[in-house]
Amino acid sequence: MQTTFEIAQKAPLAEPVELGQTAWGRLLHRLRDRMAPPALTPLSRRELLQTTIGLFVGLALTAGLVAAIVLPSALRRLPQWDIIPLLALPLIWSVSFSLYAVRTLAFGMRRTPRLDRIAQSPYLPRVFLEYGYWMFTLPIAVCVRLGVTPNQITYATLVVTAVAALGFATGRFGFAGWALFLAFMMDAWDGIVARATNKVSTSGAFLDSTIDRYNDSVAYLGIMYYYRNDLLPLLLCAGAMVGSTVVSYARAKGAAVGHDPNVGHMQRHERAVWLGIGAVCSPILAAFVEPAAAHPQFHLMIVALLVVAATTNYTAVWRIREVMGWLQRQAEQKAPAATAAPPAAPRPSERPAVVPARRKDAPAREIAA
């Protein structure tokens, strides 16, 4: 009985088949395009450093979460309602981000055009933002496939944010943090779906901006309710809410008068990451620092509120000064033209001679004389 190898040796040589024409070839092409799409660009030195640090953070977080799941620790005493958002979801994120960072270091970084229009900030490296947009691929495809409209996604963000606020108010910070992450991700989905389905409109942009202000306030109100008896976290949360509102309003009003003050730090996507990470990681620290507390302080959340409150109000003042300075320069440029002195009257010697008008009945020669 002949083996498969012997039959293959006796078989006539087939015509060469291109790689893309076979099933394995198509699979390899898809894997190659998935791992290294043509839009990838080389990293700058700063991006290389940030991505490397991000990779080590992701690997360290993965190792810590695996150890917390396998080894006995204080986290085991937490209820299952808190264990899943505290350990399982962060583990999925850390593993996927580590793989994305490895791909970025090996092949380069994708460049989302929308991120080029956002002011760069040292508080949130671009690799994290690009990773977030990369994670949107599947949900966006599902929304487009099901015919979900951008406005429906916008309204859904308010519902999810209300659920997050309820989690904050009841002390479920791990659950609330992931719900807040989902709400902020959905806030980016509506614009992407609008561009993918050719439904971009001014009314949609207005609705999105308005609902964003509601989402910010609702989330902060949930946190403030939890800290209603703690003065310091309450004041920090109030300061963060005021700063977040003025940051957005100053830019919108500046754009309305003709100057977009796209400066400063802790814009909305940065606030989402800081508040989300503070909320998700706070119960983990609280399980070790204050395991028996009936009403934990959640110290990491307080730190996140401090950073957000300080940077948002600083950015708000920066944008106010930016717009006021631009308006003052515009006024100074218009002032010389409006207040210019009228031209001086000519001297008698410079006055032109007055030629008497010709009478209708006067002969031509009389005028000439």
Image (cartoon, grey):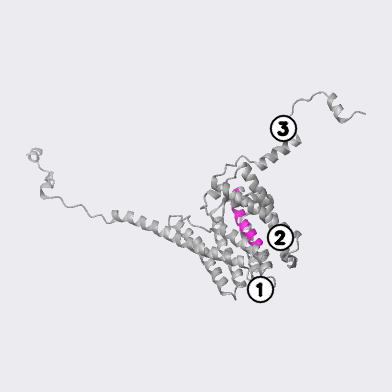
Q: Which residue is mark 2?
A: 87
Badge 1 marks a residue whose secondary structure is loop
Q: Amino acid at mark 1?
A: His
Where in the figure is residue 75, as x and y percent of width and height?
72, 65
Q: Earlier along the polypeptide chain: callout 2 or callout 3? A: 3
Where in the figure is residue 64, as x and y percent of width and height?
69, 58
Where in the figure is residue 346, as x and y percent of width and height?
15, 50
Q: Amino acid at mark 3?
A: Leu
Q: Which residue is mark 1?
A: 295
Res 90 label: none
- Please check the rendered image and state whether residue 86 is part of the magenta-colored stretch, yes or no: no
| Left or right relative to 102: residue 209 | left
At x 65%, y 62%, the residue is 281
Quadrant of the image containing the N terminus? top right
Q: Amino acid at mark 2?
A: Leu
At x 65%, y 45%, the residue is 103
Q: Which of the pair 237/253 is nearer the observer?
A: 237
